[in-house]
Image (spheres, helix red, strand yellow):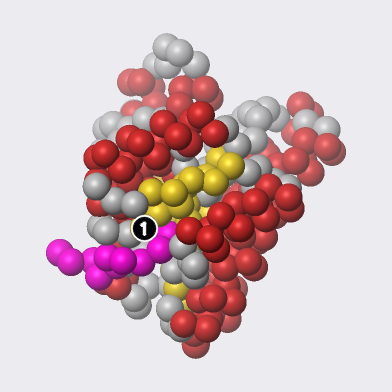
Amino acid sequence: MDLGIKGKKALVMASSKGLGKAVATELSLEGVEVLICSRTESDLKSAQSEISQKTGGTVHYAVGDVTTVEGRDAILRKAKEALGTVDILITNAGGPPAGTFDDHSLDEWESAYKLLLESTVGMIQAVLPGMKEQRWGRIIAISSQAIKQPVNGLILSNSVRASLLGLVKTLSNELGEFNVTVNNVLPGYTRTERLIELLGEDPDWDKITAHIPLGRIAEPEEFAAAVTFLASERAAFITGVSLPVDGGWIKGI
């Protein structure tokens, strides 16, 4: 299937590792010119080399902390220089610390807000004028299955990420006239460093997968394929959805 996005320009946040890197790789395989970003230049250089060797595509990188205005500005300056107008924005960020309500101070709540919501809003504000002007754009937020079915011990993530549901749905209503689609993708248990960080080095996989109807955890490439489809011309009539890629873990209808 030709996804119709060869030659498009994409900015993928938090993409030196994990799900962001997998999405950047999948987009590059489709002929999209990609800018990856994170806070650590050594990780970015490694990811840039790996992706470009695998896909043969053009991959740029920018160093910046998306939780700060200065960090976002640094990324956006490089995006303007390397890409011009951003056609596809993939918002993404690492997860906040695990814990229960009593474990977290107000400062930690504020940090989670900056990491998960402010970073998303700030990047959308920056790229949206170009998308409106050209009357084509894709905005895809990577969040978590936890926003539909909270995970015990992840109150910061459960709470703050849930705001993306309202943001995505409202933006999809506002931006339809500009041919800009806005969607939210909810990863389930996926084989990433973040998952190992949360579960420990020797997790009980049988216990975890017992709650997943497909009986296994996902590979990052499977998640990336869903995101790339939503970024494509083939998904031009899909907007305002929050798509779980979770093997059926979410039990609600």
Which residue is the extreme one toward the right? 106
On screen, residue 163 versus residue 229, left or right, reads: right
Name the residue: 37% across, 30% down: 191
Q: Quadrant of residue 34?
A: bottom left
The foreground one among 113 and 1 is 1
Q: Which residue is identified by label 1?
A: 33
Q: Position of residue 65 (x, y in %)?
A: 65, 42
Picture layout, residue 58 above or below residue 5: above
Name the residue: 60% across, 65% down: 124
Q: Position of residue 118 (x, y in %)?
A: 70, 54
The foreground one among 45 and 169 is 45
Span shown in magenta: 1-10
Picture layout, residue 191 above or below residue 5: above
Q: Is residue 227 visible?
A: no
On screen, residue 171 versus residue 184, left or right, reads: right
Q: Position of residue 252 (x, y in %)?
A: 44, 52
Q: Position of residue 46 (x, y in %)?
A: 41, 31
